[in-house]
Image (tube, rainbow, N blue to C red):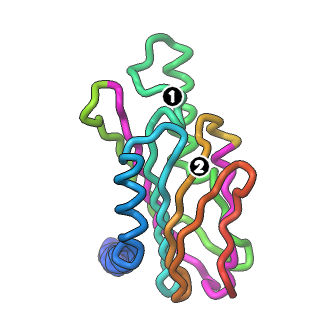
Amino acid sequence: MKNSYLVLSKRLSLAFMAVVALLNPALSHAEEQHGAHQHGKASLTFVLDGNEAELVLNTAAANIVGFEHQPGNAAEQQQQQQQLDMLKSGAWFSLAAAANCNISGQDFRQEQGSEKDHVDLYVNFQILCQAPLKLSDISFTLFSQSPALERITVQYLVNGEAGVAELSAEVSVLKFSQ
């Protein structure tokens, strides 16, 4: 089982690098304009290769938790724990039901930024789909679960289609061409 996970990770990493290479000019331009740590904004990459997929979200902690400092009291500690549990669970996105996809693995980390009160969150989901050709869309409820989040910039590679999209509370479904 662990061996198949390593093969999956290697294949998806290669597909992820292909997406980044294809979309690099757009990414470089956005990063130059806005910087990597942005309140109200997050970045997401989704790659589907065969029946294996990877979804990676990168965002400032303030977008999910509501703050980036160490919790100062029990209420902040509870808020932080609830929001991080929600993020780690994957309950904030759903793939088209017809594709019959399930989360098969997850990695999470927090990183302290170069500035004192900047913390970034990274969550990476490995997903297996029984009918990957039927993956028509991904719906996101993260905007209602994390009101400080305003925009998610998405890069994707699905069934040979590469693209970039921007999601918001008003447009929270990423649709793929069929």
Q: Which residue in the rendered view is the most extreme toward the left? A: 114
Number of dots carrying numbers = 2
Foreground: 24 or 127?
Answer: 24
* Coordinates of residue 105 in the picture (x, y in percent): 45, 62
> What type is the residue that disc 2 sits on?
Arg
Residue 174 in the figure: left or right of residue 51? right
Judge by depth and name the residue closer to the eye, 150 or 119.
150
Horizontal and vertical percent position of residue 107: 39, 54
Q: Which residue is found at the position 42% from the left and 67% from the top? A: 26
Identify whether 14 is placed above or below 61: below
Q: Amino acid at mark 1?
A: Gln
Q: Quadrant of the C terminus?
A: bottom right
Residue 142 seen? yes
User: What numbered label is drawn on residue 80?
Assistant: 1
* Residue at screen point 61% across, 82% down: 130
Q: Which quarter of the rendering shows the N terminus?
A: bottom left
**Reading the chain from its start, which is encountered first: label 1 or label 2?**
1
Q: Is residue 1 visible?
A: no
Whole-angstrom CA distance, mark 1 to mark 2, is: 21 Å
Q: Which residue is mark 2?
A: 151
Give coordinates of residue 170: x percent, y percent.
75, 52
Q: State the SS at label 1.
A: helix
The residue at the point 42 percent across, 57 percent down is 30
Residue 138 on the magenta span: yes
Residue 127 sits inside the magenta stretch? yes
Q: For residue 25, what is the image quadrant? A: bottom left
Badge 1 crowding class, 10 Å Cα cut-off, few under 14, some 14 to 19, many 20 or more, is many
Q: What stretch of residues is rendered in magenta?
A: 117-143
